Amino acid sequence: MNTQPTAIDAYLARAAAIHIKLARLQQLADDHFGHDPEAIHWGHVGDLEWVDQTLDDLLAIFDSHAK
C-alpha cells in the first residue's frame, strides 16, 4: 500500500492552505490590519506598501503561468 501523497494531493493541500491565509488576510484588511484608524502613521503606510508590492510580485508570477 502506497501512503505517499501524489503531486496533486500535495498541490491541493497547499492550495487549501493558501485559501485559508487569503481569507485571513481579507479579515485583517477589513479590520484595518488591527490598527486604530485614528492612529495610523507613515510606518503603517510603509508596511502596506511592502505588502502591496509583494502581492504584485506574486500576481506577476502566477499571471505569467496562467497565460
Image (cartoon, rainbow, N blue to C red):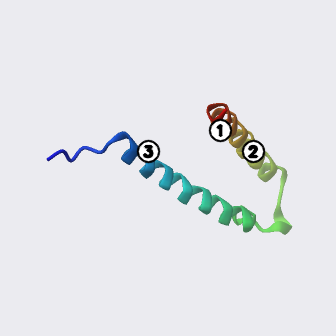
Gap between marks 1 and 2, in whole Å? Answer: 10 Å
Gap between marks 1 and 3, in whole Å? Answer: 17 Å
Residue on which the image places disc 1:
58
Mark seen at residue 17:
none
Q: What element does badge 3 sit on?
A: helix
Residue type at mark 2?
Asp
Camera-nearest label, 1 or 2: 1
Q: Does label 3 or label 2 sit earlier along the sequence?
A: 3
Indicate whether 19 appears above or below 37: above
Mark seen at residue 11:
3
Placement of the C terminus among the 4 image quadrants = top right
Q: In the rendering, at what x and y percent does residue 2 appear?
A: 18, 44
Q: What element does badge 2 sit on?
A: helix
Q: In the rendering, at what x and y percent does residue 64 appear?
A: 66, 31
Q: In the rendering, at what x and y percent does residue 12 appear?
A: 44, 50
Q: Residue at x 75, y 45 (%)?
A: 52
- Mark 1 neighbour class, 10 Å CA radius: few under 14, some 14 to 19, many 20 or more: few
Q: What element does badge 1 sit on?
A: helix
Q: In the rendering, at what x and y percent does residue 24 appear?
A: 60, 62
Residue type at mark 3?
Tyr
Q: Does label 1 or label 2 sit earlier along the sequence?
A: 2
Q: Residue at x 30, y 45 (%)?
A: 5
- The residue at the far front in this view is 67
State the image quarter where residue 29 is shown: bottom right
Q: Is residue 62 left or right of residue 5?
A: right
Mark seen at residue 52:
2
Indicate whether 23 appears above or below 64: below
Gap between marks 3 and 2, in whole Å? Answer: 25 Å
Foreground of the two, 30 or 46: 30
